[in-house]
Amino acid sequence: MMLLRVLWAEVLKTKRTIAPWMIVLAPASVVLLMAFLLSQVPSMLLFRGGDLWLGLTRIILVFWAILMMPLYITLATALLAAFEHVENQWKLLLARPVPRWTVYVAKLIVGVTMLGASTTLLVGGVLAAGTVLPVLQSELRFRLPIPLSAMF
């Protein structure tokens, strides 16, 4: 019960930062950048004989995992701890009559939830990019039905 109260306080503190915006902006920037790059390159160079949905998913997720996710995790954890670092609020926070581990676990849960939400939006962005790319590049033909189980 104590953890839920601390977790709710952490969620309320997070609303006052740019962290909720980063949940949407980080995956959207990756999808838009990769969709732009893939629209400029001939499709035969990218997806040689394989499934286009899986190829698109692989390219976007590799870019997310190698470049954007480490930056996103760093920014998210910095934003979660920034409120306490501003005026040395750690002393006040850890002097409260709650166990110290609840403060740290609440921050961890909020950070992991933010990362999970961003990754889920990234998969939605892959589906959106798969519907927009054939309009931009006519030789791309994504087959239906979408192989969601293989994508996940």
Image (cartoon, grey):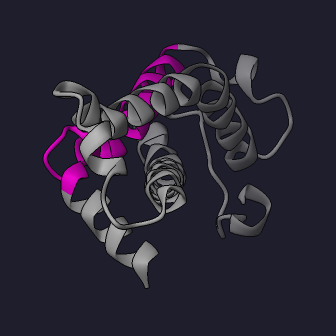
- For the C terminus, the image quarter is bottom right
Q: Which image quadrant is residue 7 in?
A: bottom left
In front of the other: 95 or 10:
95
Position in image of residue 60 (x %, y %): 60, 33
Magenta stretch in the rendered image: 13-40
Q: Is residue 26 above or below residue 117?
A: above
Position in image of residue 69 (x %, y %): 56, 31
Q: Is residue 80 above or below residue 38?
A: below
Q: Main secondary structure of the magenta part?
A: helix
Query: Could you tell whether 44 is left or right of 30 in the image?
Result: right
Residue at 20% x, 60% y: name it: 12
In front of the other: 63 or 80:
80
Residue at 76% x, 30% y: name it: 47
Residue at 45% x, 48% y: name it: 125
In front of the other: 72 or 124:
72
Question: How many marks can you see?
Answer: 0
- For the N terminus, the image quarter is bottom left
**Magenta highlight on residue 122:** no
Q: Is residue 5 above or below residue 96?
A: below
Q: Is residue 25 visible?
A: no
Q: Residue furthest right?
A: 49
Q: Is residue 149 above or below residue 103?
A: below
Q: Is residue 69 visible?
A: yes
Position in image of residue 42 (x %, y %): 62, 17
**Magenta highlight on residue 38:** yes
Q: Which image quadrant is residue 92 in?
A: top left
Position in image of residue 73 (x %, y %): 51, 33
Residue at 74% x, 46% y: name it: 54
